Image: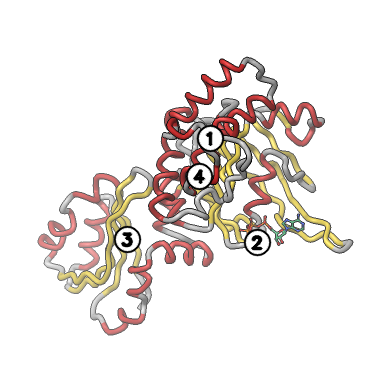
Amino acid sequence: MPAPSRSGPAVIRFLDVHKSYRVGGRDVPALEPFSLDIADGEVFGIIGHSGAGKSTLIRLINLLERPSGGRVLIGDVDMTALDEPALRAQRRRIGMIFQHFNLLGSQTIADNVAFPLRLAGARDEAAIRARVAELLARVGLEAHADKYPAQLSGGQKQRVGIARALANRPSILLCDEATSALDPQTTASVLDLLAEINRELKLTVVLITHEMDVVRRVCDRVAVLDAGRIVELGAVADVFLHPRHPTTRRFVEEALPEEAAAGEAPFARVPGRILRLSFRGAATWTPTLSRVMRETGVDFNILAGRIDRIKDLPYGQLTLALEGRDVDAALAALRGAGIEIEELPR
Ligand SMILES: Nc1ncnc2c1ncn2[C@@H]1O[C@H](COP(=O)(O)OP(=O)(O)OP(=O)(O)O)[C@@H](O)[C@H]1O
């Protein structure tokens, strides 16, 4: 069920698209037929294991891969109907960054960032220099203009990649595993930069990743890809708190190691009913739980829990064992206070 997006109308539309590759004389499907709308201004994540079809899907947006069937629309332009020159012009509206940065090692940082400007026909050197300075300032690299890529760290190289991708003022930014080669701290700072760009430049961002934590930090909506199919699609908070497909559950568990470690087995010996409570937004900080338990005389035992953020929304999840005569009344009161409750099997 497509979740409502927080943002504007669809800017990227896949209409009944599918993709096969010709391998050894036969067509091997990489993406089964699907339709999908990505909204103007959202950060849309695509998560899947290796070989699920993520790169294929993201490369269909700028037609680096041509679909085997169906149509890809950017705004009201049917990308699949364009000839090469028209396609090249449309691609300028779409920036892209890559896992391994793809910088030109023999050129300075400034020249790397200027490259797409020159490619698009810019000749006024003073204007190019001014634009490059503006872009490097945005990504925090103004002091590095005259260095070469080999002199920069991985995180700095990706910032150059982002500056280069923004050079022609695109309305869409595609991120192909943009943080997979970076350590966790650098990943966090690059994701913060992407979130800032999305907010301030109102850019639509589509990113592919195999890490749910990347999705949790920056995305508004996520599609889970499994063997060429979109098996789950929705707002990140919904998918994260209530994953339905087994692949999604595995991704969420990988992102919550301590909770997964609590596992189901230890619950078998705990008396009472086992419930997982999810609090979102303001409910995360209110003392509803203690009030309801006091009023209903129900005892609770905390088995696992965490408080975290999904993008900028605080959320808490607690796994509790509840005992007492009025457990149902307590659950009704908690639900009435906006807390989501799931009963776990024992
Ligand atoms: N150019 C190609 N020729 C033939 N088969 C391909 C080609 N590109 C991808 N495939 C196949 O299509 C399927 C999807 O690949 P894709 O690279 O889109 O997946 P992915 O989810 O991005 O994986 P990874 O995370 O490993 O990059 C895989 O089975 C892959 O082997």
Q: Amino acid at mark 1?
A: Thr
Asked whether mark 2 lies closer than 8 Å to ligand 1, one says: yes
Q: Which residue is mark 2?
A: 51
Q: Residue at x 66, y 17 (%)?
A: 123
Q: Is residue 37 above or below residue 117?
A: below
Quadrant the C terminus occupies: bottom left
Distance between mark 3 and mark 4 Cα atoms: 52 Å
Q: Say whether residue 96 is left or right of residue 142.
A: right
Upstream in sequence: badge 3 or badge 4? 4
Asked whether mark 1 lies closer than 8 Å to ligand 1, one says: no
| Between marks 1 and 4 in the image, the one whose residue lies nearer the viewer | 4
Distance between mark 4 and mark 2 Cα atoms: 33 Å
The answer to whether mark 4 and mark 2 are in CB contact below 8 A is no
| Between marks 2 and 3 in the image, the one whose residue lies nearer the viewer | 2
Percent position (x, y) of residue 244? 49, 62
Upstream in sequence: badge 2 or badge 1? 2
| Between marks 3 and 4 in the image, the one whose residue lies nearer the viewer | 4
Percent position (x, y) of residue 290? 14, 59
Q: Residue at x 66, y 56 (%)?
A: 53
Upstream in sequence: badge 4 or badge 2? 2
- Looking at the rendered structure, which numbered label has been put on residue 341? 3
Percent position (x, y) of residue 258? 33, 69
Upstream in sequence: badge 1 or badge 4? 4
Q: Which residue is mark 4?
A: 151
Crowd around label 2: few <14 · some 14–19 · many ≥20 (10 Å): few
Q: Amino acid at mark 4?
A: Gln
Q: Is residue 158 visible?
A: yes
Q: Is residue 194 above or below residue 334?
A: above
Upstream in sequence: badge 2 or badge 3? 2
